[in-house]
Amino acid sequence: MHTTAKELWTGRFAQENGIVLLDEGTYQFPLSNGACFSIHASPYTPRYGVSAFQYPSREDKFNSKASGILPYAINVSTEQSIIPAMVDIVMTHGPPKYIWISAVMRTGPLADANI
């Protein structure tokens, strides 16, 4: 059943109609005006209640192992799960635990905000 469902989002019809299944990872989308934007997608959410795609709340899925940002969290990141510092959009099933919004807001109207 999973294979059949996934085929709906990745098969010929989807490709011909510009549908892109965003599995976990970072994607670049070029626009017709020459600009492009990036999206990091993840289906995961910290464990809470009984929803799908949960991971233990002490796990850090989104920072690289080399970052050493959180000595108290267990880093389980993969190449696909790490959220790049300069990604334009982060789309997750739930809030990406251990990622701080101020860490990526280096430019724009909120750059000087005390968040």
Image (cartoon, rainbow, N blue to C red):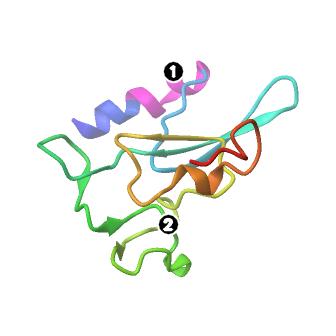
**Residue at figure coordinates x 55%, y 56% from the top left:** 83
Residue 114 painted magenta: no
**19 over 103 or under it: above or below:** above
Disc number at residue 13? 1
| Rendered location of residue 55, percent (x, y) | 25, 58
- Of residues 35 and 74, the one drawn nearer to the viewer in this rendering: 74
Q: Amino acid at mark 1?
A: Phe
- Of residues 94 and 71, the one drawn nearer to the viewer in this rendering: 71
Q: Amino acid at mark 2?
A: Asn
Q: Secondary structure at mark 1?
A: helix
Number of numbered discs present? 2
| Residues marked 1 and 2 touching at CB (< 8 Å) | no
Q: Is residue 86 left or right of residue 6?
A: right
**Residue at figure coordinates x 54%, y 32% from the top left:** 20
Q: Secondary structure at mark 2?
A: loop
**Residue at figure coordinates x 43%, y 68% from the top left:** 77
- Write down the region rendered in magenta: 8-17
Task: Give the Cα distance between marks 1 and 2.
Answer: 35 Å
- Of residues 67 and 11, the one drawn nearer to the viewer in this rendering: 67
Residue 9 painted magenta: yes
Disc number at residue 63? 2
**110 over 72 or under it: above or below:** above
Disc number at residue 30? none
